[in-house]
Amino acid sequence: MNNQELLSETEWKFDDTSKIPFWAYTNKGIYEKELKNIFYKKHWCYVGLEAEIPEPGDFKRTVIGERSVIMVRNEQGEIHVVENICAHRGMRFCRKKHGNAQSFVCPYHQWNYTLEGDLQGVPFRRGVKQDGQVKGGMPKDFKPKEHGLTQLKVAQRGGVVFASFDHDVESFEDFLGPEMLHYFDRMFNGRKLKVLGYNKQRIPGNWKLMMENIKDPYHPGLLHTWFVTFGLWRADNRSELKMDEHYRHAAMISTRGSGGKNEQTTNVSSFKEEMQLNDPRFLDVQPEEWWDGPTAVMMTVFPSVILQQQVNSVSTRHIQPNGNGSFDFVWTHFGYEDDTPELTERRLRQANLFGPAGFVSADDGEVIEFSQEGFEAKKDYQTLVELGGRDIEHTDHMVSETLIRGMYDYWRKQMGV
Amino acid sequence: MTTELYLKLTQFYQDYAASIDLEEWDSWFNMFTDDCIYKIQSRENYDRDLPMAALSLEGKGMLKDRIYGVTETIFHDPYMQKHVVSAPRVISSSEDFIDAQANYSVFRTKNDGIAEVFNVGRYVDRFVIDGDSLLLQSRVCVFDNDMILNSLIYPI
């Protein structure tokens, strides 16, 4: 089947985005279009943190959509992002995950590129001399400057690096919009970041489900029993849901309450009033000045990254799709250069709540897998997203699926469905 | 190291694997000292001296809390584990301590499924010799997998 045939089954039969057809997650043509229209066009995608490549020549290999890219710091200290495809035979030449280089060399035929991606060396470009004659080599009109690596547009803010294959993309600041920029700058306020390490998981579900998970404040108090059991989550915590003007990005902002627990605020059947941690250090929170109130802000920057502040645990979560039914989820945990060793310990201890083994995040990967299982077997069915009504609006509570409705409103415009 | 002690060490590795595979959690955390360290960490973080781990527990209390999470609060697809653990390689030993390592493979079988390779790595261990018995003061499970297959629930 070609993409055209595959796309023919994709008609949006609903009045709004309070229902989402299963084909949005299962259709291969739709997925290819998402890569083309969203990941490779008009959007800034996350590539990493400046702190991951502190020295000239440092590089990190990562991906945008399904394309392998390299984030590198050149001799002058500037950050560039180039695609990991040799201009000659298309090889993904960079195999190391990270390292330090003076130039990029494709081992196949030793084509040599500067760290900015300009072609600077082609072996036998001028052929070989034999019997007084020059034989072979590249044509006389071969221009190295036309055969560099694909160079991406780069945006840096607060130590975070984004890139785009689309050189006509709007500025990063316009892309985020003022409201989201406020929360971005709150977390990345200019202090140097200190990388604590990575957690990586492969989740067999559609990549959008992870965005939806972090736009869904309905589930944390219900799925994540651990949160509720140990008093970290209450439905009546002071909270807000906010979006950019296009509804593509969002922030769930909440402030941990101090009240007691009761049935009304938990609604969890397995809730156990008396439970205490054997080791309360998992939740030994040290308030930080930069929070400016909220104890948790979860930001979705469409389409590629989630920015997490859950009390002292801060991380970026990078979405790397590999097919309509699977994505890799890469967590980069970090701290700030002025953190005391005690605060670093806290960040590391609280990280036990998150990631593929996390007390409250392991569940998320599981439910995404099982949603995808449901979708695959019944492609003409739909999910229901009506909590809090059918409109798209900012709220001052958590009992709404408005952010998911917003994302699909935007998604439909990008996809023409 | 005496042959007797090496045999005891070997038996310890196999008992550890069995207690996890059989989900005998009490015997699992009783194999650790009170002030133990237990980590499941990617080789990438371990080799680069990055402190982050998929799981990083300090002290028996945290081990107990993890088991409570595994058995009572974390929603996950049920699965069985089967560990295959190599003979231990003794790095150094004294009267009080043994530093040893062993390779492991963990196979995961879900309810409707077939066994699959879930996690492959190396135990990096420090044992305390406590009279007649051995206890783990530190176990770091350093795994080679770049990606954890969705989620990691049980200890390894």
Image (cartoon, rainbow, N blue to C red):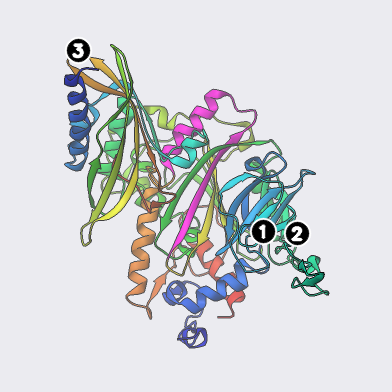
User: Which quadrant of the rendered structure holds the C terminus of chain A?
Assistant: bottom right
| Residue A351 is a magenta residue | yes
Tag 1 residue: A110
Chain letter for mark 1: A
Residue A263 in percent (x, y) is at 31, 45
The magenta segment: A326-354
Q: Residues within 10 Å of mark 2 (few under 14, many from 20)?
A: some
Which numbered mark, 2 or 3, is in the foreground of this view? 2
Tell me, for residue B131, which label it has, or none: 3
Q: Is residue A25 at least partly visible in the picture?
A: yes
Secondary element under disc 3, as helix, strand or loop, is loop
What is the quadrant of residue B60 in the picture? top left
Residue B3 in percent (x, y) is at 18, 21
| Residue B7 is a magenta residue | no
Secondary element under disc 2, as helix, strand or loop, is strand
Tag 2 residue: A121
